[in-house]
Amino acid sequence: MPYVAVKGGEHAIQNAEALLQAKRRGDTTVPELSLEQIKQQMQLAVNRVMAEGSLYDPDLAALAIKQAWGDLVEAAFLLRAYRTTLPRLYYSDPIDTGSMYLQRRISAIFKDAPGGQKLGPTFDYVHRLLDFKLAAESNEFTAPTQPPIAATESAPRVVQTLVQEQLVTPPPATPVDAPPFDVTRQPLHTPTNRDARLQNLARADEGFLLSMAYSTQRGYGSNHPFAGEIRMGDVEVVICPEELGFEVAIADITVTEVQMVNQFTGSKDIPPQFTQGYGLTFGYNERKAMAMALVDRALQAKDLGEAIDGPAQDEEFVLFHSDNVEAQGFVQHLKLPHYIDFQAELNLIRQLRRDYDQAQPHQAEEVLVADSPPSANAEPSSATGQASDPNVPAKHPASESHSPSELTP
């Protein structure tokens, strides 16, 4: 795409950057936000930036939010850009979410789920009313009557109960010998495997996934599942360096995992059973994990022989439009100079307009000739071969029409 170098704007660009920094800081008499404040008091924003930025680092995510003036998409862009500069030293083993140290765990399909249900921190049971007490500087909140759940216990998966009865289809198996797809280093092509789909969805824009999931529930995909299990907690990240020959736990990270179960009436090769949709995100990001699970299930439509009725079932549409870093870049590039492109379009429109204006008088003359009354010495019509006789009533075009009964054989 051709661009024209802009000269003489360096000073203006520097001033624009300085103005951005001043606006980001705001009133200097107000204490500046610290990274620790952002990390502690805006945890959900930090978690979203880590998920969409594909990098688990709360400190860097807080820094990106501060630098981005609170713009979470811009913050995810900053974090992902920084991620590309990091060396890859080791590959971790797959995290074991079955041994997650639970902070929250609920199930909508079994009241007495094995291991019990833990509500944890949630907006589910609070009124959506502004709490003006939070505006007070010395705000004091009501302390929980019970201490926070110690993240020291795990619980079996709820869906495992259905697996034991063979009432739920297992997820598509990944070839053992094939290395997993790496969405950060390999170009995405469709059709693709489920490992690539899940990686793409894990760092997809939450708003996009939410709208896709909503569309499947409204009928564009006929996907209205049950929340088999939603769990949030800490898991270990383990690596196994070849030079050591044994596993080493290097960190504990917080993740949110969702398993949806959806009714499936069966097909020629698959008996009636439940199917699964899966969602996993960094941090406490329950809404996105649920949306991811719905979209994952919708994208299995082709494998299950279901009709493709909605955009959420279209793999190409979902995977190539879900990344907000790519999407915002392509949309916002329209702000860049397009002087040559527009000049070409302008010349084309001017030429088309001249052609259009020149054609107008000829069209007006043709209309006048067609509307003028026939003369007594008029020549036979070239179209019909009949003379224009003023004593013969003109045949109205409507009289040439036929009734439906005449057209019926």
Image (spheres, helix red, strand yellow):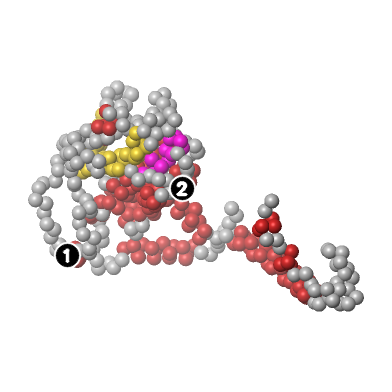
Give amino acid for label 1: Lys
Q: Which of 185 and 24 is in front in this view?
A: 185
The residue at the point 67 percent across, 53 percent down is 408
The residue at the point 38 percent across, 40 percent down is 297
Residue 323 pos. (x, y %): 43, 48
Task: In the rendered structure, find residue 22 and report the number of the disc placed on it.
Answer: none
Secondary structure beneath dot 1 equals: helix
Left or right: where 7 falls relative to 28: right
Residue that carries the numbered disc 2 in the rendered image: 311
Q: As drawn, which residue projects farthest toward the left?
A: 145
Verify whether residue 396 appears in magenta: no
Residue 347 pos. (x, y %): 67, 64
Q: Nearer the viewer, residue 207 or 187?
A: 207
Residue 1 pos. (x, y %): 59, 53
Marks 2 and 1: CB-CB under 8 Å?
no
Q: Give the range drawn in magenta.
A: 294-305
Residue 108 pos. (x, y %): 24, 43
**In the rendered image of this protein, does residue 190 appear above or below residue 4?**
above
Left or right: where 294 falls relative to 351: left
Nearer to us of marks 2 and 1 is 2
Q: Which of 356 and 10 is in front in this view?
A: 356
Distance from Cα at disc 2 to Cα at disc 1: 43 Å
**In the rendered image of this protein, does residue 157 appear above or below residue 287?**
above
The residue at the point 68 percent across, 61 percent down is 403
Verify whether residue 296 appears in magenta: yes
- Residue 156 appearing in the image: yes
**In the rendered image of this protein, does residue 296 appear above or below residue 402?**
above
Residue that carries the numbered disc 1 in the rendered image: 133
